[in-house]
Image (cartoon, grey):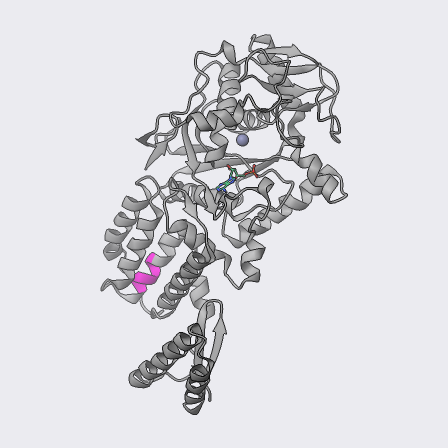
Amino acid sequence: MELTNTLTMKREPVIPHEPGHIRMYTCGPTVYHYAHIGNLRSYIMEDVLEKYLRYEGNQVDRVMNITDVGHLSSDADTGEDKMVAGAKREHKSVMEIAQFYTDAFFADCEKLNIRRPDTVVPATSRIPDFIRMVQGLLDKGYAYLAGGNVYFDTSKLREYYVFGNQTGEDLAVGVRDTVDADENKRNKTDFVLWFTKSKFEDQELKWESPWGLGYPGWHIECSAISLRELGEYLDIHCGGVDNAFPHHTNEIAQSEAYIGHPWCKYWFHVQHLNDARGKMSKSKGGILTVSALEEQGFDPLAYRMFCLQSHYRKPLTFSFESLQNAQNAYNRLVARVAALAKEGDPDREAAQGFQEKFRGALGSDLNTSLGLTVLYDMLKSDLSDATKRYLVGDFDQVLSLSLLEAAEKAGQPSEPPVDGELKAHIEELIARRTEARKNKDWAAADAIRDELSALHVAVKDTPQGVEWHLEG
Ligand code: AMP
Ligand code: ZN
């Protein structure tokens, strides 16, 4: 497969350190609130990547951290520590908040068919590893003590800004002059590895360390967890694009300084989900969650479909109108699968052509929308129904839209089939009624409804559109 590597900004073939075995790390959620559908866009696309790598026959080991401690990288951070603020807001302890939102995160993932990574590690469970790594960086001369904290010294690196796509604006966010400077830092880009003193004094969780009672900086957790679980040669590191700087930049700085050689070969960054106000973000508030979509009558898998319809490297703008379109497309797709006859054996040889096309799409920088097109083309083709069902199941190992299961649930229509002409007439009446309702012409809409009742047609308005059936 080929992926665009943010490190080089080039499309490159994915060649793991050990052939056929891919080690993959994903920055997990900061568990002070529900994940919003923007966060989940990143996790959906990372899930498709993992599943596609498996589909190609690779063994994949995937590790995810859970950020359940601190979210600070220096005293120049703005605002409050997010975990502490979340606990205060809900009158709970930090660990209670972390457990609650970790469970909520995985419940959302399940609804979206996002596979739980093989290994999930809460940061608080690995404090001794972080301390060992910070000590190692001090011993190697890459870190220094100042004002009670341990800082990483970015001036010791040959190159600090490693990502080809780092723009001036990105960089400004991490090292702005406008936020109050952290006086202890030797260089603007230095960051805290371990805090014992901070303006954020109300930390609930603190641990003994060689430098005093304290807590880790934000970045160290991902480096230490990845190195312990996946070794010194990581193949793919994933995250939303906002994490490229400073988080991933600092992960690379400290990991490579510690191990003394290049660390991760491919960086996979998912562009943001935006709404009318710009990037969806937990700290901005007004976020949309999976439950909010469900409350409005949407199937979480319609949101997955919405994400698959566009490329991961393009920003995606959310609106309920476009989600409704995705829901309609999903319903039509399921209905099409439900209409396939179940009898017969698939012709695996005949299926190969479409499997190749599917691999051509997904293997080409994870082009999921092209993958969906291959699925549609396949359903339109003259393959047998059994072969089509086989291919739906095959592609769905990667797309994870539960197409066969949803089609099973949709079942066979319980009413006797409507003859073609009558069906066309009913659908025309329904379209006219929808138009009348749109124009707020209630009298016309009611008259059409009466006409439909006379034909024994029951009509129901749902968020997915108008549903109808013939009454017995
Ligand atoms: P957080 O819980 O803030 O640590 O973020 C979890 C993941 O979601 C990270 O990979 C972020 O980069 C990603 N992320 C945050 N906001 C968005 C967004 N609006 N669109 C896509 N991904 C996002
Ligand atoms: Zn991380």
Question: How far from the left and from the top, in percent, is residue 49?
Answer: 41, 41
Is residue 402 visible in the rendered image? The answer is no
Q: Nearer the viewer, residue 438 or 109?
A: 438
Q: Quadrant of the N terminus?
A: top left
Locate residue 95: give its quadrant: top right
Q: Residue at x 63, y 27 (%)?
A: 72
Q: Nearer the viewer, residue 47 or 298?
A: 298
Residue 409: say if magenta. Answer: no
Residue 432 shown left or right of residue 209 in the figure: left
Question: How far from the left and from the top, in percent, is residue 278?
Answer: 48, 43
Question: How far from the left and from the top, in percent, is residue 367?
Answer: 33, 45
Locate residue 430: give its quadrant: bottom left
Identify the magenta region.
386-391
Q: Residue at x 22, y 64 (%)?
A: 382
Q: Is residue 472 above or below residue 62?
A: below
| Main SS, magenta residues | helix
Question: How far from the left and from the top, in percent, is residue 207?
Answer: 73, 24
Is residue 72 visible in the rendered image? The answer is yes
Q: Is residue 30 above or below residue 401?
A: above
Q: Residue at x 69, y 40 (%)?
A: 86
Q: Residue at x 50, y 48 (%)?
A: 114
Q: Is residue 449 above or below residue 129?
A: below
